[in-house]
Image (cartoon, rainbow, N blue to C red):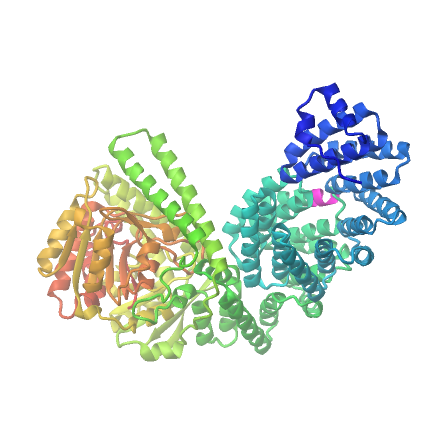
């Protein structure tokens, strides 16, 4: 029969009776209405909300015609539209009405069609048994009338519902039935392969699941189904994540995201974002995982994706636990469990309960953790993947409770289950707990073997990841492995070489990976090359940040309200967060560097050290600190009296006292004797507690490079008091990101010693002393090149650094807590970020940063020191001088004036003498009893 030629818009544009007349003019009411219903369904695929309006109007026309069969078909179309628009309750009402009308009319095809259409709404609301019944009823009817395609579709949907009911084996049987019925329809067979893969994934059959996903991908690509391609790529990414193949997961998530962006599907993009957040969490980037989940959760909720919403809540709960927000984490996991239970997913609810145990472990509640995990184990006996991970967590809880034999048994069982299903990442967890287990029971040789195996797995995983942030995150996530190694080194010997190695493996690894052994730093200075889309978006964001910062400056000058300035600041922070997010995405598109740096050994370091230079590394093992002193004559362990938590607390008090003193100076008031005495007491406690064991060493060294552990890198060195004297009075201190980095920088080959001095300064009414700094430096070095105020553009500066061995930069600076590599210097024409500085070619120069907080770094990433100093070392600097806190304009001008006078009078090249001469100047300030806030924040970082 020829299809009626009638347009839906034409009919809907008529008034009530005119519509009926127009349809009856066509001569076949049912054929005409089915044509209109088909057009209405097409509108649903274009826009579900429009589809709802259109299909409900078609229902009105069908009712006016009084034909039950057409009424059933029209209601089925409306049910379909309402399901897609997430109006599930109304969809179910229309579906039931469609079924009643079809039954009354005795039309089996319309009945089966109505049943099939109502499945989605029932499934979304968790009414899965009803959904399954509808699928089977539809399948029976379609097979009876010989419609193999729709019967196969019904069988496939039955499998999907069975999988949601945690009946994966029965789902596979339905998929097998569907495959026989759908032979020859490539798109439906591809959909079937994707659904089959998810059921196989539920059963832990990873190899077969991957093969099935890949078949689906090929089929969808051949059929040009880009949206379906994106869904399968996301599923493959999820599979890679579950198997611990984190690098591959990131690549696949990014590929899928590009498809969803092109389709402008916010709900699917949110689902993908939530799953990618799980990968980021597994790597260790909990802050970025939380940011993604906070965005995804409300979108999935409003989009009616209840299972996906529950999964995102589960991931968010674990993320919050990792970040220390235990109460919120537990309530979020409880919400996820309730949502899983309401949608008929008991296994996923059990998994969320098990993850509650993981959060309790993070909160050091081993009893509560063991109870939750055991309960989850009893509910997941046929889920090998869940069982393996739960047993590892339970082993950790049992070990903390002193049940060593039970912990060892659980780890053995978990290892066998992991091997049987191909979990790539669980070996690292198992070996890490074995280190604790064997060390705790005195089996040191076995503990050392497990430690070496864990490190080998860890380094392979770290090396597979692209981008500094992700590599830093994995170190942050697995930091306890190295702390356990430090503890083992103390217990088993002690072994100072092992203690030193563990501290080095946890410190500044990505900085070393970036190419510090070359003269000019990073080999690939432009990570955005070839990425026009994200690269241009990043460029726009950075330009926006620059404009906003200039607006803030102008607002201050115009004395605009504080609320206006605060709103500009908020916009800057939002833009900075987006920069971090896009850079993480950008790194996912690039191949991993493939280069994994190895730390220097304690023996090699001792052989490389010059006479009268020492390196003191502080290594963490839980709250305990242990010191390793290395000099040219060898190495030895030194006791540290203070714990990490106490040192951190006193360090915070020092910074608070510093702020008080600087605030008084800014207000024009003198710093009282009481304030000076109070900070001296704190600095004495901190210095004696951390460095007190070195009092016999200072007579034999002139320089001391100190490697602080994560969490203590913000501490000043020069003003620390040891035995009643400032450290700077005992030696010239250097802050080393790690001993390996300091060594690499010390031997860095460049041409700095043969080059001159460059001074760059931009002054204004807030920092007028910059002019004095430049004038004093010019007197000390008459041949210095000076870029003053308007001359100090970024382009001029970039060209001038090539001729400089010593570079002094005096200008405003800002540290960004949201994006430390977005921290910036204010040159004449723009704000210049740390990222831009990292692309300079400094070739071994020493760089002095005369701006506020230029020495601050991002404390969220253990031992990596993202910030201004890092960027200059990557760019090729041999060392930097930067300030940990705000500068006092007058005091800093005097300090730098004295510094450059000293350097000019000292023998040797200026870039080589700055360590000793800065110590000399700081000693002068200390001798004159000046408050450390005025001089103690300046620190040399890099080479000794």
Q: Residue at x 47, y 74 (%)?
A: 498
Question: Which one is nearer the viewer's eye here, 166 or 35?
Answer: 35
Q: Residue 120: give x, y in percent of width and height.
A: 74, 42
The front one of 656 and 298 is: 298
Residue 283 vs 750, above or below: the answer is above
Q: Which residues are magenta?
A: 337-341
Q: Determine which quarter of the picture holds residue 870.
A: bottom left
Q: Residue at x 68, y 62 (%)?
A: 215
Q: Quadrant of residue 874?
A: bottom left
Q: Position of residue 859 (x, y in %)?
A: 42, 54
Give the main secondary structure of the magenta stretch: helix
640 lies left or right of 213 = left
Residue 26, percent across and down?
77, 29
Residue ID at (66%, 40%): 45
Residue 340 visible to an observer of this rendering: yes
Q: Quadrant of the C terminus?
A: bottom left
Residue 397 visible (yes or no)? no
Q: Is residue 378 left or right of residue 595?
A: right
Residue 200 found in image quarter: bottom right
């Amino acid at each position: 029969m020829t299809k009626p030629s009638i347009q839906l818009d034409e009919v809907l544009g008529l008034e009530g009776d005119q519509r009926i007349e127009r349809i009856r003019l066509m001569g076949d009411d049912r054929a005409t209405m089915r044509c209109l219903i088909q057009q209405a369904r097409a509108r649903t695929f274009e826009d579900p909300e429009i589809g709802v309006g259109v299909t409900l109007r078609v229902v009105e026309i069908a009712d006016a015609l009084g034909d039950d069969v057409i009424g059933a078909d029209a209601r089925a179309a409306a049910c379909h539209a309402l399901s897609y628009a997430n109006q599930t309750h109304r969809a179910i009402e229309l579906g039931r009405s469609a079924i009643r009308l079809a039954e009354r009319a005795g039309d089996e095809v319309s009945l089966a069609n109505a049943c099939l259409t109502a499945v989605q709404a029932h499934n979304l609301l968790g009414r899965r048994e009803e959904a399954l019944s509808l699928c089977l009823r539809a399948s029976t009817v379609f097979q009876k009338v010989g419609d193999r395609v729709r019967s196969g579709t019904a069988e496939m949907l039955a499998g999907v519902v069975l999988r949601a009911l945690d009946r994966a084996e029965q789902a596979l049987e339905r998929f097998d039935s569907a495959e026989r019925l759908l032979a020859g329809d490539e798109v439906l067979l591809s959909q079937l392969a994707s659904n089959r893969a998810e059921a196989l994934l539920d059963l832990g059959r990873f190899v077969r699941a991957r093969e099935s996903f890949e078949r689906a991908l090929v089929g969808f690509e051949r059929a040009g189904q880009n949206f379906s391609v994106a869904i399968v790529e996301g599923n493959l990414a999820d599979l890679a994540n579950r198997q611990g193949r984190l690098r591959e997961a990131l690549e696949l998530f990014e590929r899928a995201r590009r498809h969803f962006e092109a389709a402008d599907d916010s709900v699917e993009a949110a689902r993908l974002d939530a799953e990618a957040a799980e990968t980021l969490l597994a790597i260790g980037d909990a802050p970025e995982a939380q940011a993604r989940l906070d965005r995804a959760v409300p979108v999935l909720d409003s989009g009616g994706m209840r299972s996906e919403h529950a999964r995102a809540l589960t991931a968010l709960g674990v993320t919050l636990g990792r970040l220390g927000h235990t109460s919120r984490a537990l309530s979020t996991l409880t919400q996820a469990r309730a949502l899983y239970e309401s949608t008929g997913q008991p296994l996923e609810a059990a998994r969320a309960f098990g993850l509650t145990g993981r959060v309790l472990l993070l909160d050091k509640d081993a009893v509560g953790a063991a109870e939750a995990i055991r309960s989850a184990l009893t509910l997941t006996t046929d889920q090998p993947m869940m069982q393996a991970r739960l047993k590892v967590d339970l082993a950790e809880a049992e070990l903390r409770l002193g049940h060593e034999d039970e912990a060892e048994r659980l780890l053995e069982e978990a290892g066998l289950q992991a091997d049987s299903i191909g979990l790539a990442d669980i070996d690292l967890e198992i070996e890490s707990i074995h280190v604790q287990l064997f060390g705790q029971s005195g089996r040191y040789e076995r503990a050392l073997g497990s430690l070496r195996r864990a490190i080998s797995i860890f380094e392979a995983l770290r090396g597979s990841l692209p981008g500094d942030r992700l590599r830093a995150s994995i170190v942050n996530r697995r930091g306890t492995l190295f702390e356990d190694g430090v503890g083992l080194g103390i217990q088993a010997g002690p072994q100072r070489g092992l203690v030193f190695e563990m501290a080095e493996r946890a410190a500044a690894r990505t900085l070393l990976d970036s190419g510090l052994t070359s003269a000019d730093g990073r080999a690939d200075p432009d990570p955005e090359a070839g990425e026009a889309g994200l690269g241009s978006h990043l460029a726009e964001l950075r330009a926006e940040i620059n404009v906003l910062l200039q607006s803030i400056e102008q607002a201050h000058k115009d004395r605009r309200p504080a609320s206006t300035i605060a709103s500009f600041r908020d916009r800057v922070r939002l833009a900075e967060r987006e920069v971090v997010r896009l850079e993480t995405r950008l790194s996912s598109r690039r191949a991993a560097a493939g280069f994994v740096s190895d730390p220097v050994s304690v023996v090699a370091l001792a052989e490389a050290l010059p006479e009268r230079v020492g390196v003191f590394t502080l290594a963490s093992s839980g709250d305990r600190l242990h010191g390793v002193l290395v000099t040219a004559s060898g190495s030895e362990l030194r006791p540290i009296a203070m714990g990490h938590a106490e040192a951190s607390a006193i360090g915070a008090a020092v910074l608070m006292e510093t702020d008080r003193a600087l605030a008084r100076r800014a207000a024009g008031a003198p710093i009282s004797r009481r304030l000076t005495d109070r900070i001296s007491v704190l600095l004495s406690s901190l210095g004696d507690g951390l460095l007190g064991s070195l009092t016999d060493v200072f007579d034999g060294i002139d320089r001391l490079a100190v490697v602080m552990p994560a969490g203590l890198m913000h501490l000043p060195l020069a003003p620390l008091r040891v035995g009643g004297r400032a450290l700077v009075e005992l030696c010239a201190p250097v802050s080393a990101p790690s001993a390996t980095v300091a060594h690499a920088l010390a031997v860095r080959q460049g041409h700095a010693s043969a080059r001159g001095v460059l001074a760059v300064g931009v002054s204004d009414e807030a920092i007028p002393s910059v002019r004095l700094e430049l004038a004093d430096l010019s007197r000390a070095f008459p041949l210095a090149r000076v870029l003053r105020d308007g001359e100090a553009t970024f382009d001029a500066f970039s060209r001038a650094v090539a001729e400089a061995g010593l570079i002094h930069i005096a200008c405003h600076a800002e540290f960004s807590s949201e994006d430390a590599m977005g921290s910036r210097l204010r040159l004449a024409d723009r704000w210049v970020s740390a990222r831009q500085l990292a692309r300079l070619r400094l070739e071994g120069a020493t760089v002095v940063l005369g701006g506020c907080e230029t020495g601050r770094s991002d404390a969220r990433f253990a031992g990596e020191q993202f910030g201004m100093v890092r960027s200059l070392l990557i760019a090729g600097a041999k060392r930097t001088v930067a300030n940990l806190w705000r500068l006092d304009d007058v005091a800093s001008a005097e300090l730098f004036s004295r510094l450059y006078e000293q350097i000019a009078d000292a023998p040797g090249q200026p870039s080589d003498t700055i360590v000793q001469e800065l110590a000399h100047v700081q000693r002068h300030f200390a001798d004159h009893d000046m408050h450390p806030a005025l001089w103690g924040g300046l620190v040399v970082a890099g080479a000794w």
